[in-house]
Amino acid sequence: MKKIITTIVILVALITGSQAQNKLNANQGFWVIESNVNLPKVQTVKFYDANNRLMYEETVYTKLNTKKKKTLVALNQILDKLSERTAYIESRNLVTLSLNLKH
């Protein structure tokens, strides 16, 4: 009986995990925040397409808190806008303007 219950629990966990992965848009791309230990308030935000090609890059002079929902939503919205374009975008301060950061 314990083996059956354990098997059912494992199957449910696997099915649930695979459904969560299906919600992601694989064609969209991703963003990365890079920082340096010596300069923690200087961070570079890079946006990549689904083929791992750099679409946009911006250096911000403040620490971005990725635990805040506002920051995540803003970065994901920028990624959505960049994904609609095909060419590399020159620096326009998209992150700074979107999060109302100091220049």
Image: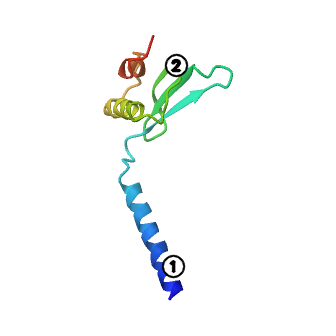
Q: Residue at x 37, y 56 (%)?
A: 22
Q: Residue at x 43, y 17 (%)?
A: 101
Name, please, the residue furthest toward the right. Answer: 38
Is 91 left or right of 43, judged from the image as shown?
Answer: left
- Could you say which quadrant of the image residue 99 lies in? top left
- Could you say which quadrant of the image residue 13 lies in? bottom left
For the residue pair 48 and 58, the one nearer the viewer reads as 58
The amino acid at mark 2 is: Thr
Counting from the top left corner in percent of width and height, residue 70 is at: 38, 31
Specify which label sits upstream in the sequence, 2 or 1.
1
Is 20 left or right of 10, judged from the image as shown?
Answer: left
Counting from the top left corner in percent of width and height, residue 21 is at: 41, 55
- Specify few, some or many for label 2: CA neighbours under 10 Å numbering under 14, 14-19, or 20 or more: some
The secondary structure type at the circle numbered 1 is: helix
For the residue pair 89 and 75, the one nearer the viewer reads as 75
Relative to 19, does residue 64 appear above or below in the rendering? above
The secondary structure type at the circle numbered 2 is: loop
Relative to 57, does residue 5 appear above or below in the rendering? below
Whole-angstrom CA distance, mark 2 to mark 1, is 48 Å
Residue denoted by label 2: 62
Counting from the top left corner in percent of width and height, residue 95 is at: 41, 22
- Could you say which quadrant of the image residue 17 lies in? bottom left
Residue denoted by label 1: 6
Quarter of the figure with the C terminus: top left
